[in-house]
Image: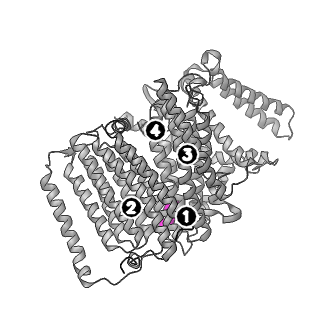
Amino acid sequence: MDVVLFLIFAFIAVVAAINVVVQTHPIASAVSLIGVMGSLAILYLLLGAEFIAVAQVIVYAGAVMVLFIFVIMLLNAGAEVKRGRSLLVQLLGAPLLIALLGLLAYFVQRIFPRNVTVHFGGFTGGSAQAIGRALFTTYLLPFEVISLLILIAILGAIVLGRKELD
Amino acid sequence: MDAFIVITIIKLLVIAFVLLTAVAYLQWVERKVIAHIQVRPGPYRVGPHGLLQPLADVIKLVTKEGLLPSYVNRPLYLFAPFIAVAMALLSIAVIPFGPTITVAGYSTWMQLTDLNIGVLFILAVSSMGVYGIALAGWSSNNKYALLGGLRSSAQMISYELPLALAIVSPLLLSNTLSLRDLVGSQAGDIFHWNILKLPFPQIVSFIIFVIAAFAETNRIPFDLPEAENELVAGFHTEYSSMKFASFFMAEYLNMVTVSAMATLLFLGGWEAPWPAAYGSSLVPTVIFAIAGLIAFYHASNPPHKLDRYTFAATGVIFLIIAAIFLAPIVQSWLLPLFWFLAKTGLILFVFIWIRGTLPRFRYDQLMGFAWKFLFPVAMLNLLVTSFLVAWRS
Amino acid sequence: MTQVPISWFLTLSAVLFALGVAGFLFRRSIITVFMSIELMLNAVNLSFVTFAYEYKQVNGHLFTFFVMVVAAAEAAVGLAIILTVFKNRATLNIDDMDSMKD
């Protein structure tokens, strides 16, 4: 059951991620990216990270990507114009990427022993309560700093969005 | 394990059937209430008092030709109504309607499933619902639809903030994220409900929640995405037949969800407003009995000839329902269901009432209201609540 | 064999990260480039959560949480920059935004 779920959603994630890269229209890429994020959220659930799974959907899929789609719609961004690429890139790009991927996969499989396995319910420490507790004790300083970062980001966005700026 | 699967499938079928019928009739109720506010009879032709109008609407929408405009982005155009209605249906899965019931030895909750992050789940699903509208607006390749989609995504992002902040305060009081435990923490009379609970009654956050819910469901006075005098029909200008019906259904389903959420978060879910010792268990009986007597009164001096029989039959039905509420076997699960539906229905009525009362906002007023008024007030309310909760513990 | 080896998750993370790098390098639309960055961040998040599972500790989840917050802040500022650039240059092609070069 766990393997089936993993394979289904890993497949969706990889196909959607490939779609993000090969689609020429930004909105198609954005929708595919939402697909990646949604299937990752389900994989997080499989790993026992329920709070992170929901936060992934709320923050990434529900807020950040809405912002992306909003900007794409606002700018009415069209499909990307094809540019002639050099022969070297066309010939070597895809094979090199696949070689890199193969190498990465090989090392990951080598380094991590196969006896550590994931099954649903194997780790239950990812509840909202556990995360909240850690956030306000061990990670209090980073938490405060990051709230400052958000404030700065909001101010930056407002300043950049002002009309008279050029 | 098998019993669990069978029970789940039964619950699924019951909830799906009841919910879809309720949504169809919610639209009938809305048309009737709006009509009576505007002093006109409303739907009247199909069935007595237009009671079969929803059926006629469904038949019309299903049999209509589904047009596919030639300039649309086809995959997204077809995908958008699906995602809108799917996300609206999904959030019903975690909403509890009442406590456990025991049927033929099997006891089960009146709820499809309980998540220990149920509140967050509903927030997540509702935040995905915006894609249905935004993508519909974009893929229609129509400037009005695009403007409607843009407006709705901006509006929904903005109002999600006060909505989430308003939800946090009752969660602080209840100290749980599971919707079932949320109601459990409000058990008792009306002063244990989060809206009136000490140390800090959540009336302010209840009002903020309802206002933000109006905006999230694109209802008047916040229905800028489909403002018909500026944008034709907004994001669903290019949609017809079942695809249009999907958006329509999604809007009403979202209304039901947010009303149920307001009931669960603030109004104590299925808890009666005062203890059964003081006669709260008699309230449904009294209400239905009065309704039956009114029907009998109208049957005795009928405005039309036929009404002598129809009103009498309605009166008998109401009296039977009143008697059912007295039966001790069903009382244990019928009463909580009654209170839950009564509270949810009350909020749904407010939705309709406001549609019949208020005009639409201007767009800059809408955004200014969210950012300059609702957001600071929700923040302040959250601060005060958290200080009081911390001070008490 | 009903359990998933932990290395599969990490391989998936690596695949997604590589695809993000590919998108970042190959695409010309600035919005797609930005989305590729988000894809890479997501891939990294997956490996954080996987390690949290392996060591049965919540710390990985907190790193993911912080990455998400930073990504949200980054998206807000980045998209504001994109809007400003589009207003001034009327282009989204990153090859045309080279006035710092000369």
Which numbered circle lies on residue A33?
2
Q: Horizontally, is A149 left or right of A93 in the view? A: right
Q: CA distance from mark 1 to mark 3?
A: 24 Å
Q: Chain of mark 3?
A: B
- Amino acid type at circle 2 is Leu
- Amino acid type at circle 1 is Arg
Choose between B311 and C60: the one closer to the eye. C60
- Amino acid type at circle 3 is Pro
Q: Chain of mark 2?
A: A
Q: Quadrant of the C terminus of chain B?
A: top left
Q: Residue at x 74, y 46 (%)?
A: B32
Q: Chain of mark 1?
A: A
- From the top left corner, tell me how far across and down residue B269 is, in percent: 55, 31
Magenta stretch, residue numbers: B76-81
- Residue B388 visible somewhere in the drawing: yes
The dominant secondary structure in magenta is helix
Q: CA distance from mark 4 to mark 1?
A: 48 Å
- Secondary element at image label 2: helix
Which numbered circle lies on residue B112?
4
**Can marks 3 and 2 be said to lie on one chain?**
no
- Secondary element at image label 4: loop
Choose between B7 and B244: the one closer to the eye. B244
Q: Are the residues at dot 3 and dot 4 in contact (C-beta closer than 8 Å)?
A: no
Q: Which residue is mark 3?
A: B162
